Image (cartoon, grey):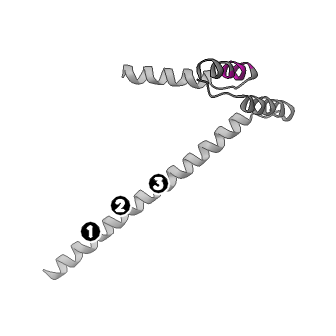
Amino acid sequence: MKKTVLFLSFFLASKLALADCNFKKAARNKMLDQKIGLSGNCDTEKAVKTQATKKVDDNLGVDSKKIQKDITDKKIMSKTKSLISIRLLIKLNKFISLHICRKEWRHDN
């Protein structure tokens, strides 16, 4: 249980730390890449995209991250419902097959 809580806290902390890509992070990652050959997930292209998205969100008065999360949640729910439907159909098919076999066996005897 402790390992799970610890893992989840690290996961959430890393998600929050990597949430926004800005020019400061992009410059730091570029410097790290040049000095030691390692860089983070943020580069100038992502920083420009993030800044442009923020400006558009501010101008339109929307939150694109929330909209994207809602769309992802809907896709997940749709896939989950499909999977549940398929599993129920498989169970129903097995039940019907078993029931038919029992009837045929009773009829034969």
Q: Quadrant of residue 45?
A: top right
Q: Residues within 10 Å of mark 2 (few under 14, many from 20)?
A: few
Query: Which label sits on residue 28?
Result: none
Please report the residue visible at 49 percent of the width from the left and 20 percent of the height from the top: 9
- Residue hosting label 1: 98
Direction from residue 79 to residue 40 in the image, left or right: right
- Residue type highlighted by circle 1: Leu
1 or 3: tag closer to the N-terminus: 3
The residue that disc 3 covers is: 83
- Spatial separation of the CA atoms under disc 1 and disc 3: 23 Å
Q: Residue at x 41, y 63 (%)?
A: 89
The quadrant in which residue 72 appears is top right
Image coordinates for residue 64, horizontal then vertical, percent: 74, 36
* Highlighted range, magenta: 24-30
Left or right: 70 in relation to 93: right
Any magenta on residue 26? yes
Q: Nearer the viewer, mark 1 or mark 3?
A: 3
- Identify the residue position indicated by label 2 in the image: 91
